[in-house]
């Protein structure tokens, strides 16, 4: 069995995720951070305090791509 990283454990505890979902959330957060030019801990803070609606929708439809696109759109600089 693969061990979770400390960041994945933080995600798991904050959002009550399974091991598999914590790893998936880490990939989503890392991808978003790379695309918008933020640190993954900044994205994590944004998720905790600004994405209740998106996280609730994820629990309903389990659509990780939609979650990622929605958060990316909110964090990208609008030009």
Image: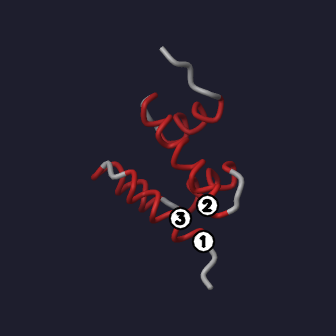
**2 or 50, which lies in front?**
2
Image coordinates for residue 71, horizontal then vertical, percent? 51, 63
Q: Which mark is residue 61?
A: none
For label 3, the crowd category at 10 Å Cα-Cα, with few meaning under 14, some 14 to 19 and many 20 or more, is some
Residue bearing mark 3: 72
Which residue occupies the extreme bottom position in the image? Answer: 79
Which residue occupies the extreme left position in the image? Answer: 61
Residue bearing mark 1: 76
Residue at point 64% right, 53% down? Answer: 45
Image coordinates for residue 5, horizontal then vertical, percent? 62, 28
Image coordinates for residue 19, horizontal then vertical, percent? 46, 28
Q: Earlier in the sequence, mark 2 or mark 1?
A: 2
Q: Quadrant of the C terminus?
A: bottom right
Residue at point 43% right, 31% down? Answer: 20
Q: Is residue 1 above or below residue 22?
A: above
Residue at point 64% right, 55% down? Answer: 34
Residue bearing mark 2: 35
For label 2, the crowd category at 10 Å Cα-Cα, with few meaning under 14, some 14 to 19 and many 20 or more, is few
Alpha carbon distance from label 2 to label 1: 8 Å
Is the Cβ of the residue at disc 3 closer than 8 Å to that at disc 2?
Answer: yes
Residue at point 34% right, 57% down? Answer: 57
Q: Which quadrant holds residue 46?
A: bottom right
Q: Is residue 12 left or right of residue 34?
A: left
Image coordinates for residue 35, horizontal then vertical, percent? 61, 61
Is the Cβ of the residue at disc 2 closer than 8 Å to that at disc 1?
Answer: yes
């Amino acid at each position: 069995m693969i061990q979770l990283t400390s960041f994945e454990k933080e995600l798991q505890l904050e959002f009550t995720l399974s091991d598999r979902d914590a790893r998936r959330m880490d990939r989503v957060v890392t991808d978003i951070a790379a695309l918008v030019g933020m640190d993954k801990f900044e994205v994590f803070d944004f998720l905790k305090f600004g994405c209740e609606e998106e996280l609730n929708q994820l629990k309903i439809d389990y659509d990780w791509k939609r979650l990622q696109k929605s958060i990316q759109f909110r964090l990208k600089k609008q030009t």
